[in-house]
Image: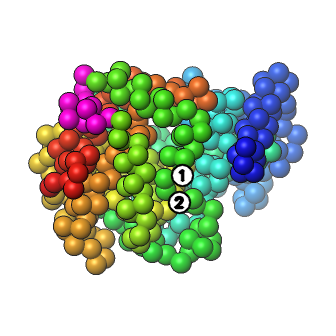
Amino acid sequence: MTTDNASRFRTRARYAAHSVWDQLTSPEVTSPSDVPWRVEAITPEWLTARVCSEHEGARVESIDVRGKGDMGSTVHRWLTVRYNDAGRRAGLPEAMFVKSTPTVLSRLASGGRVVTQEYTFFSVARPELDIETPTLLVSAIDNVSGRSIQIFDDLVATKGVEFYHRDTVVTRTAAEGMVDTLAAYHRAFWDSPRFADDLSALPRHGGFLEFGKRVGMVDSHNEAMHKAADVIPPGVFAKRDRIWADAEQTMSFHTDGPRTLLHGDMHLGNWYETRDHVIGLADWQNTCTGSWAFDFAYTVSTTLDVEDRRAWEKDLLSRYLENLRQDLSVDTAWEMYRRALNVPLLLWTPTLVPSPVFPDMQSEEMSMLMIQRISTAMDDLGTLEEGGHA
């Protein structure tokens, strides 16, 4: 076992042990520096210290926890917070959305690393961007135990947001809003020297491929390809044994170009629309750096109905490039987009057949839809063909 692998094993073992201990002992929060092990452990005193410190006399008086604890890579709950008069006068947020890591699987899937990535985005990158995203109110991480609490404004309560879902039909106007959003944050951090400075906590895109090999995702992918065979075009299914290796080659192909800020997980369920019809993007815990093409390919292939994607993708790419304002030709961009499509597929096949060390993060229906859309785009654009075709 290499030194890096041994270190990762120790970290994962430590997270698992702390999670089991937390479940057995249900530790209480005794100081503002503590990280609550689950949402129900948050106390009015702890939340007061986190959200009221800049408002003299403001205090949280009670907290109601709502929701059943939806499980993805984190556990999701909602809070209704009641303040004293000073807190209400200050207009402090009363409706909050919380992501936490109370279980073994959530800490193994998220732990301190991805929380750090999301915090880096919201604390360093987000203030410079004119895009619609949630507001991060509290971020608390314990890298020893893997405990984490991320508290955001509740967008449904504050902005009348409707999150997209499996049955959402994305309109042409909404699709244009999506690629405008991509271009905005890609342009702001295009080939940025800050990736070696205050954004150095963000990893390079593609590390999940090596990680996936270590935790059984290759087997999950292979099994999922067979399980989803009925929705995968025959041409892609016939070349299924090449997909993982081709994705690794794609990473190498894109490494030579400029890096930019990537969201990394912009599937249908992470996009939303406000009551004012502004397109927004949530869940930045996979923020990383790499080629623009991965975000673009992921967005276009997963959010759009197949026929709409076929009809709009070239126009959307042209619109993206116009807003990106970089020296990138349409032909070069098209080739990069085409070749990048195998990477999002490898993010979705393991959700259909999860690895033993990952939680069941998506419904089978959602996973099937994403696999069908991505693999059809790969077939349409010849992602797995020798030399490719447009």
Q: Residue at x 78, y 54 (%)?
A: 57
> Looking at the image, which residue sits at the far right?
30
- Residue 133, how many percent across, how many down? 45, 54
Q: Give me the disc on residue 207.
A: 1
Numbered marks: total: 2
319 on left or right of 180: left
Image: 345 above or below 16: below
User: Where is residue 276 drawn, in percent x and y?
Assistant: 31, 51
Q: Quadrant of the C terminus?
A: bottom left
The picture quadrant where one finds residue 351 is: top left
> The disc labelled 1 sits on which kind of residue?
Gly
In depth, the one of 87 and 226 nearer the eye is 226
- As displayed, is residue 105 above or below residue 139? above
Residue 242 lies left or right of residue 60; in this view the side is left
What residue sits right under mark 2 in the picture? Answer: 204
Residue in the picture at 42% in, 24% down:
223
- Estimate the x, y position of residue 307 in percent, counting from the top left: 13, 40
Tags 1 and 2 touching, CB below 8 Å: yes
- Queried whether the magenta region covers residue 231, the answer comes back as yes
Task: Note whether 351 is above or below 156 in the view shown.
Answer: above
| Left or right: 365 as drawn, with respect to 217 | left
Q: Which residues are magenta?
A: 230-240
